[in-house]
């Protein structure tokens, strides 16, 4: 058994890619996309015709609608290859506008439904700002399931649990990046690996809190830098993993050091934890107190917004 197969015994494996031709070899349950991954895909010769065809078909529509149709087209292709769900992201430039996020999410779902896809197979990805979490609360009440992304802090996770969102994506690698950069020459890679990795410990804390208080929101670790981070979170509800790391895991033998789950509901239940509750003011204060989360959330929104604009430019050139 390889490590990917071993991991699948404890955790639902999700492919983090817009390159759907890679999916079959890893047989993930679900798949996630984002503007950066779609931008990367449409610049490959095998995907450019898909974008051009969609732009040509809907060239008289507004740019934002054509964008959504491209995202849904990719989503439908992905869903034809996996048994589970696909995550499709709302325009990151709407991250601070609750109503606009709700409206855009509802349009994405309508486009999926028009393509014959059941709502249960789609997760709408939204940045975990206060406004984004509020949009997710409204969408969940309307039967549209959400995946709250760009999640770096415990307060974001708690607020998402309060909003009863379907799933959260805490970013392991980007947390790790921040602490490593801050430490500079003092960073000890070996000492900060495994359970001591700041990104890994962040997800572990969230997982334990959710399981302890029976919060139904699924935890999906995301943004990994190496297979060690992935394996340290065996037992997490889901892990979304880039194809490069999936390939490494499938090439590594599990027999010499068999994988055991490090996240276990019974362990979480046994902990002595305090239940937290956030309103808008206390959430903003808690997020502001976390320099890493504040910086990485802002940086992530900027990066996704920039890639969305690049994608729009490619669409205009294809028209």
Image: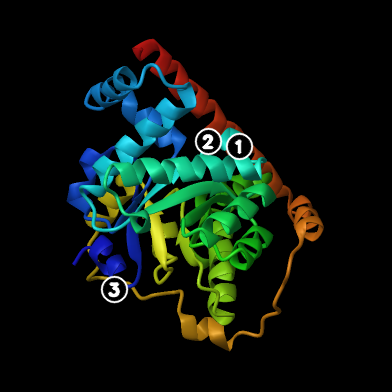
Seen at 75% across and 58% down, the residue is 283
Residue position marked by numbered label 2 in the rendering: 91
Q: Nearer the viewer, mark 1 or mark 3?
A: 1
Q: CA distance from mark 2 to mark 3?
A: 41 Å
Q: Quadrant of the N terminus?
A: bottom left
Seen at 34% across and 20% down, the residue is 55
Looking at the rendered structure, the secondary structure element under dot 3 is: loop
* Circle 1/circle 2 CB separation < 8 Å: yes
Q: CA distance from mark 1 to mark 2?
A: 6 Å
How crowded is the residue under tag 1: few (<14 C-alpha within 10 Å), some, or many (20+)?
A: some
Specify how the rendered protein is coloured.
rainbow
The answer to which image quadrant residue 134 occupies is: bottom right
In this rendering, does residue 251 appear at all?
no
Rendering coords of residue 86 (x, y %): 35, 50
* Circle 2/circle 3 CB separation < 8 Å: no
Rendering coords of residue 286 (x, y %): 77, 58
In this picture, residue 230 sits left or right of residue 249: right
The answer to which image quadrant residue 42 occupies is: top left
How crowded is the residue under tag 2: few (<14 C-alpha within 10 Å), some, or many (20+)?
A: many
Seen at 24% across and 58% down, the residue is 83
Judge whether 60 appears above or below 280 on screen: above
In this rendering, does residue 50 appear at all?
yes
Residue position marked by numbered label 3 in the rendering: 258
Task: Mark 1 or mark 3: name the one nearer the start of the chain.
Answer: 1
Q: Nearer the viewer, mark 2 or mark 3?
A: 2
Judge whether 307 appears above or below 247 on screen: above
Q: CA distance from mark 1 to mark 3?
A: 44 Å
The answer to which image quadrant residue 203 occupies is: bottom right
Looking at the rendered structure, the secondary structure element under dot 2 is: loop
In this picture, residue 226 sits left or right of residue 309: left
Residue position marked by numbered label 1 in the rendering: 94
């Amino acid at each position: 058994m390889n490590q990917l197969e071993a991991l699948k015994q404890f955790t639902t494996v999700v492919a983090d890619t817009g390159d759907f031709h890679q999916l079959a070899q890893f047989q993930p349950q679900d798949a996630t996309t984002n503007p950066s991954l779609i931008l990367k895909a449409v610049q490959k010769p095998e995907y450019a015709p898909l974008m051009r065809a969609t732009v040509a078909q809907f060239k008289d529509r507004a740019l934002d609608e054509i964008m959504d149709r491209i995202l849904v087209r990719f989503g439908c292709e992905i869903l034809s290859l996996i048994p589970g769900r696909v995550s499709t992201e709302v325009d990151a430039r709407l991250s601070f506008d609750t109503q606009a996020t709700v409206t855009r999410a509802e349009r994405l779902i309508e486009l999926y439904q028009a393509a014959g896809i059941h709502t249960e197979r789609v997760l709408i990805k939204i940045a975990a700002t206060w406004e984004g979490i509020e949009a997710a609360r409204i969408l969940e009440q309307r039967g549209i399931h959400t995946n709250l992304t760009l999640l770096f802090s415990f307060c974001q996770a708690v607020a998402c649990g309060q909003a009863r969102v379907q799933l959260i994506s805490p970013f392991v690698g980007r947390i790790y990046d921040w602490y490593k950069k801050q430490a500079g020459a003092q960073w000890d890679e070996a000492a900060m690996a495994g359970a001591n990795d700041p990104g890994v410990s962040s997800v572990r804390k969230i997982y334990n809190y959710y399981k302890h208080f029976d919060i139904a929101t699924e935890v999906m670790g995301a943004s990994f830098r190496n297979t060690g981070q992935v394996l340290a979170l065996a037992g997490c509800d889901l892990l979304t993993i880039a194809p490069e790391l999936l390939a490494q895991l499938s090439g590594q033998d599990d027999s010499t050091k068999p994988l055991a789950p490090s996240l276990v509901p019974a362990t979480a239940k046994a902990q002595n934890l305090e239940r937290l509750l956030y309103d808008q003011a206390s959430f903003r204060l808690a997020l502001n107190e976390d320099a890493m989360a504040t910086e990485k959330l802002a940086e992530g929104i900027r990066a996704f917004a920039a890639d969305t604009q690049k994608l729009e430019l490619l669409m205009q050139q294809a028209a």
